[in-house]
Amino acid sequence: MKRRPVLLAAAVALAAPLSATHADGDASLHAEGGAGVDTNPGRTIGGAGPADGFAIALLRARGVAGGGGLRLAATLDEAVRLYRREAQASAIASRLDTAARLPLGAGLVAGADLSARDLTERGHGLDQDALHGEGSLAWTGGAWGAALSGGWTLFAPREATLRPFLASGPEAALRLSWAPSADDVLSAGYGVAWASFPRWDAVASGGRDDRTQTASVEWARTSDDFIVSVGYAYAWNRSSADGGNFDRHRVAARGAATLPLDVTVALRIALQWSSYPRPLFLPQQLLLAEGQESQDALELRLTRPLGRAAELALAIAHYRAEAVSGGGSALDYRRTLVFATVTWRGEWRRDHGAASFTMGTP
């Protein structure tokens, strides 16, 4: 599997400020390995191929630094998944996330975020790159808060039949929040994203430009023993290309809680209903939903410490994407993964020039 060095080069360049000699900070290393079963490793639409076992490994490096009020952070993930029989589905994935925050006074905080990811499969069926940059300005005053953001996104599938779905464009969002108590936060937001498809003439003449608007609401509660959030979003996309319009309702909930015997449980549920009045490209849209993180999802994860520096995790995840045409017919995509992993963590800290290293979470 050929890899592109772009993410590693970006990691070096963007993480360099974290080693500034006059900034306090810390760094952590996370290593994870395990095995599991995948019911649809070939990502078959309208059914499922034979299940297959796989081995997984993940390495995550994170650095945080601050000085003069400025806070910088960078996280680099490198992951590998190897299948026993479905070798073409074996993949290497990279993700880089960087963030900067600067308090401006009077409750204002300026922010900048950049993320980049790359997926390369042995069979190259879903190879893709993605890039997202965003600037933001947030304000908090008592129980109230507001955030305004603007950015740019690139999504670039590399497989030949999916290359026309390369899209890029600007986006903007406004979010308001209210905390009626110390534990609860209610928020509402509106966002709009524009996307141009420069390769669309390969599948249809006339080009393609989309505008997607999204309205959302969310409630979140945080306590000593658990955290939970529930939200709803409605998105409507209008496209200059025939078959590009859609409407989507999405309900999402997530939470985590501590259980007896030092067990922690985390749960995420996302359900969506999408309608395409003229579904000319449903198979491609359903396949790309995996890369764009716009599927139905049910994820359950149980973790328990193994000493100070390691933990054992058992997880099950079910993903589904369905699109309904104007006539009521539907295509769907389903995939379930069950796996177990062991994780090790180490942490390095520097405070006013003094350094220390610990294994596990202090």
Image (cartoon, grey):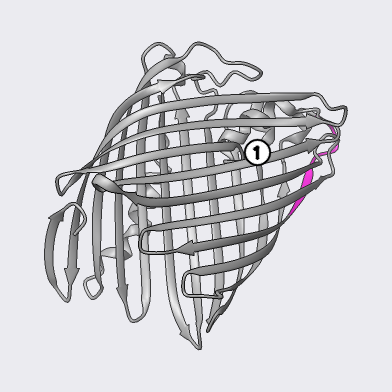
Q: Is-magenta flag for residue 22?
A: no
Image position of 144 with respect to 159: above or below: below
Residue 128, above or below 254 = above
Residue tagged 1: 166
Instruction: State the image coordinates of residue 91 (x, y, percent, origin top left).
Output: 42, 27
Q: Residue 265: x and y, percent?
A: 37, 45
Residue 49 figure quarter: top right
For image coordinates 49% across by 77% down, the residue present is 109
Residue 159 spot, x, y in % from top left? 58, 26
357 to the left or right of 56: left
- The residue depicted at 36 percent of the width and 57 percent of the height is 74
Report helix, strand or loop for mark 1: loop
* Along the line of sight, the residue nearer the viewer: 46 or 24: 46
Counting from the top left corner in percent of width and height, residue 252 is at: 59, 48
Q: Is residue 41 left or right of residue 230?
A: left
Quarter of the figure with residue 362: bottom left
Q: Quadrant of the N terminus?
A: top left
Q: Residues within 10 Å of mark 1 (few under 14, many from 20)?
A: many
Residue closest to the far front: 260
Observer-nearest residue: 135 or 20? 135
Nearest the viewer among 186 and 109 is: 186
- Asked if 310 appears above or below 73 in the picture, the reply is above
Seen at 60% across and 37% down, the residue is: 296
Label 1 is placed on what type of residue? Leu
- Residue nearest the viewer, comparing 145 with 288: 145
Residue segment shown in magenta: 204-213
* Residue plotted at (29% across, 29% down): 34
